[in-house]
Image (cartoon, rainbow, N blue to C red):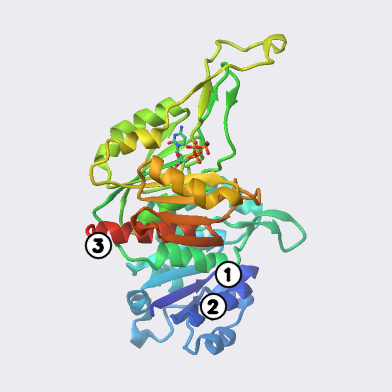
Amino acid sequence: MSEILLGVGGGIAAYKSCDLLRRLQDLGHEVTVVPTPASLNFVGKATWEALSGKPVHTEVWEAVDRVNHVALGDRADYIIVSPATADLIARLSAGRADDLLSNSILASDAKKLIVPAMHPKMWFNAATQSNIRKLRELGFIVMEPDSGKLTGGDSGVGRLPESSAIIDKFNNEISVEQDLNGFKVLISTGGTREAIDDVRFIGNKSSGKQGLAFARIAKARGAEVVLISANVDTSREFGISIIKVENTEQLQSALQTEFPKCDVLIMAAAVSDAKPIPATGKVKKQSYSKLDLVPTPDLLADIAKQKNSQILVGFAAEESANLLQEGKRKLAAKSLDFIYANDIASGSIFGSDTTSGLIISAREDEIEEIHQISKESLATRLLNKVSERLNSPNV
Ligand code: CTP
């Protein structure tokens, strides 16, 4: 399949990359391991050579005749660095080349996935956060570490993500075709907030994770991405245009401007169906017992009326029993090409990293059942259908 260079940094999580290596091989990839010299304190050369079946070097001064510092990066289709320590991240963000791994990365055009693991204090240190930002600006895909128990008894953000999550990220954002190159994808994400007064609002539980997953993956597949973000932290996103909105009215006006320019609209935002007439100042508690609401327009249904050749993807949040019926009803009522009917029965959809539901296509009533997959994988499956339609519009 592909040639992968697996870089291993000097952290205790290095042992977990033995499992990652195996899983990449199981998927059919050829993996060459390049550990940093420091990482050999945790997992020795012999282990990597035995597992990869290839010679393992750490310094540019070994096997000089093979010009490994250029050849390894040149040959790689993809580079994964797992674990990436604070020091390694600092070196990479500065463009240093002081061991074989950093040399190979500097000399490679391959897509690069960085999987950090370190103590929370090192992770949240402003220097590390600034280095991470720099790496993302440079085009590296950097995963967020997991939260949980760490070596030494502490707990917090800094654990290496599970191998399955790293593979998921790799499959969805790294090892992808540029099939959306030349297309403009407009995505809305998050949840609108409608002001009750100057300090209170009506909101919803949408975390924005699904829309962010669409944005990252569409970008990784070559699309020009415009993200309309309703109350979501977008500080970790790079390479996409972001329009920040708070309420339904602002979301509507952003859609009006951007929709005519896009090829695809993915309407993942949870939009308020009604809003109060906001009071000025702060309503005192004696008068705070009843709210009068006025309906908001259905933004998706309205924008669909201006559709030219755009592909429209909508969402529906439904109880399991209503999934199919309500999904189909909203698909038709809002003139959509695809709808994802999200099963909210388990109560874990909002803020969760996984999702279950039904993808319903308007053409031929095609239905695909989705059971507990990552929001990234759902984005990939839906974008596959969108891409098929974009690349062969008449089929
Ligand atoms: N939507 C919209 N404008 C609204 C409400 C919803 O554009 N005022 C969009 C959402 O972004 C989503 C789709 O319509 O893509 C379905 O949203 P959902 O809340 O499931 O459906 P509603 O039409 O609001 O119906 P109900 O709340 O009665 O289930």
Disc 1 or disc 3, which is closer to the eye? 3
Q: Mark 3 vs mark 2: which is more N-terminal?
A: 2
Disc 3: which residue: 395
Q: Amino acid at mark 2?
A: Arg
Residue lying at the far right of the rendered structure: 153
| Label 1, residues with CA under 10 Å away: few <14, some 14-19, many ≥20 | some
In depth, the one of 229 and 260 nearer the eye is: 260
Mark 3 or 2: in front is: 3
Under mark 1, the amino acid is Ser
Say if 319 sits above or below 255 in the image: below
> Dot 1: what SS?
helix
Q: Secondary structure at mark 2?
A: helix
Task: Say whether disc 2 or disc 1 marks the residue closer to the N-terminus.
Answer: 2
Residue with the mark numbered 2: 23
Q: Residues within 10 Å of mark 3 (few under 14, many from 20)?
A: few
| Marks 1 and 3 in Cβ contact (< 8 Å) | no
Q: Percent from the top left, x then y, of residue 297?
A: 42, 27
What's under tag 3, amino acid-wise? Answer: Val
Tell whether 93 sits left or right of 108: right
**Which residue is at the front of the view, 315 or 263?**
315
